[in-house]
Amino acid sequence: MSDAFARQETILAEALGTAIRGPRRNGLFAVWLVLRCCGDLLPPNRVSERGHSRRMEGLEHRLHGLSLPRPLRRALMGALQQLREGTPNAVAIALQQLVAPVDETLGATSGRTVARAAELARSRMRNAAQE
């Protein structure tokens, strides 16, 4: 994972630390978890297929119990379907699909953070294909 992608995780973690309890904080936590899972699928330090499968199971289990705004829950379920593929391309698509719902439910800063992460995922994917 790149330092730039890790920075996007840090931005969400900082927002999570300042959020009050409730659906907004749960939403930030859910998006942060998804972002962490996405980072593990990007080159050059991708996790193994078995590791990815175990992480997806854990992620799905953790997200299931969270109280989330409906648009965000729907978007996260769609992102999880994409991420099951386990490819960098799936990461870029999943993150791009999350941008609007995150922006709408969690605010513009979080939306920009996810959009930047999607850009970084696409960039990583292109760089890996060129090598």
Image (cartoon, grey):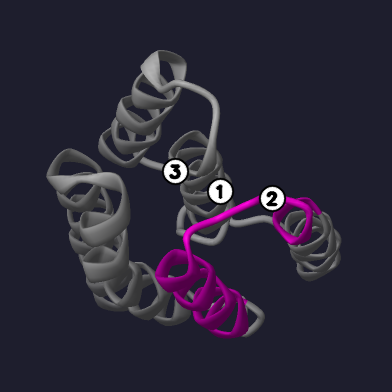
Residue at x 23%, y 73% (from the top left corner): 126
Up/down of 95 relative to 129, above or below = above
Q: Quadrant of the N terminus?
A: top left
Q: List x then y, in percent, for residue 23.
A: 51, 44
Q: Secondary structure at mark 1?
A: helix
Tell me where the magenta segment starts and ends, as one range.
62-83
> What amino acid is labelled 1 in the image?
Ala
Residue at disc 2, secondary structure = loop
The quadrant where residue 58 appears: bottom right
Is 56 situated left or right of 111 in this image?
right
Q: Are marks 2 and 1 in contact (CB under 8 Å)?
A: yes
Q: Which residue is mark 1?
A: 30
Residue 66: image tag: 2
Tell me the amino acid under the disc marked 2. Leu
> What's the distance in space between the residues labelled 2 and 1, CA to CA?
8 Å
Q: Can the viewer see residue 95?
A: yes
Mark 3, residue position: 1
Q: Do labels 3 and 1 touch, CB within 8 Å? A: no
Q: Residue at x 70, y 56 (%)?
A: 63
Tell me which numbered mark, 3 or 1, is placed earlier along the sequence: 3
- In the image: residue 54, left or right of residue 115: right
Residue 8 to residue 119: above or below: above
Residue 122 falls in which quadrant of the image?
Answer: bottom left
Q: Position of residue 131 (x, y in %)?
A: 30, 69
